Amino acid sequence: MKINAIDVRPGHVLESEGKLWLVLKREIVQPGKGGAFTQIEVRDLKTGTKSQGRYRTQETVERAQLDEKDMQFLYMEGTQATFMDSETFEQTVVDRELIGEAADFLQENMTCTVQLHESTPLAVTLPQSVIMEVVEADPVVKGQTASSSYKPGKLENGRRVMIPPHIGAGTRIVVNTADATYVERAKD
């Protein structure tokens, strides 16, 4: 399926030179003179090699046809995550590296979207946010205002996030899975 280069987004999979490339970053550059162009950073899904490409905004690129399936996360064994298709009960094993840093937020029975190309998993998308418990929180520094600063906190999965001063250990919070940032206090 051909799409304009300006419509390419991170997470898209492009087909070029007989290879599949995962788009990592996209930037639209408007130089002082000349036409605007799209600069993208891609990773070869087989070898892991990174590359960069530049396209005029009107140029077309080939987007690979992917099957998207909602799958349930079962467990993590070493660096392998196992997902189950909710309809066929087929299990698919995905390398943690393919999921990226968001793998820290995988929770048992969580429904994720797995992108497949000819039955090979290419990417896993987690829900936008998860609820996690803060297990460690630094004390509030005297004179610190609630609106201007955050303090470090540690979540139950071991990840460190910046949290508002009023959040203490034992509090459940909503965390954005894409960039591991605090969203709000969880409603019980």
Image: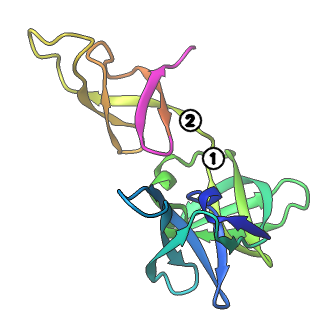
Label at residue 54: none
Q: Quadrant of residue 165?
A: top left
Q: Is the image coloured rainbow, by chain, by secondary structure, or in one colour?
A: rainbow
From the viewer's perspective, is residue 73 above or below residue 175? below
Query: Does the magenta portion include 91?
Result: no
Q: Eyeballing the image, is 154 above or below 101?
A: above
State the extent of the magenta-drawn residues as a range. Answer: 177-188
- Residue furthest toward the left? 142
Residue 80: x and y in percent read 56, 69
Q: Residue at left 42%, top 44%?
A: 157
Indicate the amino acid at tag 1. Glu
In the rendered structure, which amino acid carries the disc numbered 2? Ser
The x, y position of residue 50, in whole percent, is 44, 78
Q: Residue at x 27, y 12 (%)?
A: 147
**Cβ–Cβ below 8 Å for labels 1 and 2?**
no
Disc 2 crowd rating (10 Å Cα; few below 14, some 14-19, many 20+) is some
Label 1 or label 2, whichever lies nearer to me, is: 2
| One can see residue 79 in this view | no
- Residue furthest toward the bottom? 18
> Circle 1 sits on which residue?
108
Residue beneath the point at 44% across and 79% down: 51
Task: Tell me the residue that label 2 is attached to.
Answer: 129
Q: Is residue 4 left or right of residue 187?
A: right
On the image, the x and y values in percent for residue 119 come to 79, 76
Is residue 149 toward the left or the right of residue 20 in the image?
left
Bin the neighbour count of mark 1 within 10 Å (Cα to Cα): few under 14, some 14-19, many 20 and up. Answer: few
Residue 187: say if magenta: yes
Is residue 16 visible to the viewer in this orientation of the structure?
yes
- Residue projecting furthest to the front: 33
Is 125 or 12 nearer to us in this picture?
Answer: 12
